[in-house]
Image: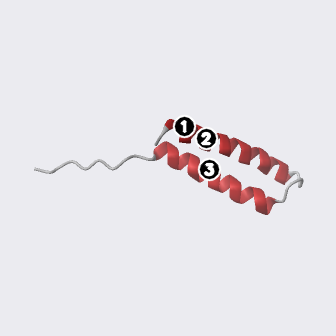
Amino acid sequence: MHPLFQILFFLFFVIAFCLNILGLMRIIPLYVTLPMLFISIYLALYSLFYQKPYRKRMR
């Protein structure tokens, strides 16, 4: 995956984590911050471990 996506998803993760801290302090509702955090973790891990399938011809 393109390195720009990895940087953007990591920044999204950091922002979602900070918003989740605010949610734990009951400033922002947790039902808003927790899905954002889980989606950002999923996208960050997906962008790090995504590999294009390489099909080698068998002889």
Residue highlighted by disc 2: 8
Q: Position of residue 57 (x, y in %)?
A: 17, 50
Residue with the most extreme left position:
59
Residue 4 is labelled as 1
Residue with the most extreme bottom position:
31
Secondary element at image label 2: helix
Cβ atoms at labels 3 and 1 below 8 Å apart: no
Residue at 78% x, 63% y is 31
Secondary element at image label 1: helix
Residue at 88% x, 51% y is 25
Crowdedness of circle 1 by 10 Å Cα count: few (<14), some, many (20+)? few
Q: Position of residue 30 (x, y in %)?
A: 80, 59
Crowdedness of circle 3 by 10 Å Cα count: few (<14), some, many (20+)? some
- Real-space Cα distance between discs 3 and 1? 16 Å
Instruction: Classify residue 6 as left or right of residue 38.
Output: left
Instruction: Classify residue 58 as left or right of residue 36.
Output: left
Residue at 58% x, 53% y is 42
Give the vertical position of 29 relative to 2 (above or below).
below
Give the residue type at disc 1.
Answer: Leu
Residue highlighted by disc 3: 41
Q: Position of residue 12 (x, y in %)?
A: 67, 45
Crowdedness of circle 2 by 10 Å Cα count: few (<14), some, many (20+)? some
Q: Position of residue 29 (x, y in %)?
A: 84, 59
Determine the image quadrant of residue 39: bottom right
Give the residue type at disc 3.
Answer: Ile
- Real-space Cα distance between discs 2 and 1? 6 Å
**Is tag 3's residue or tag 1's residue first in the polypeptide sequence?**
1
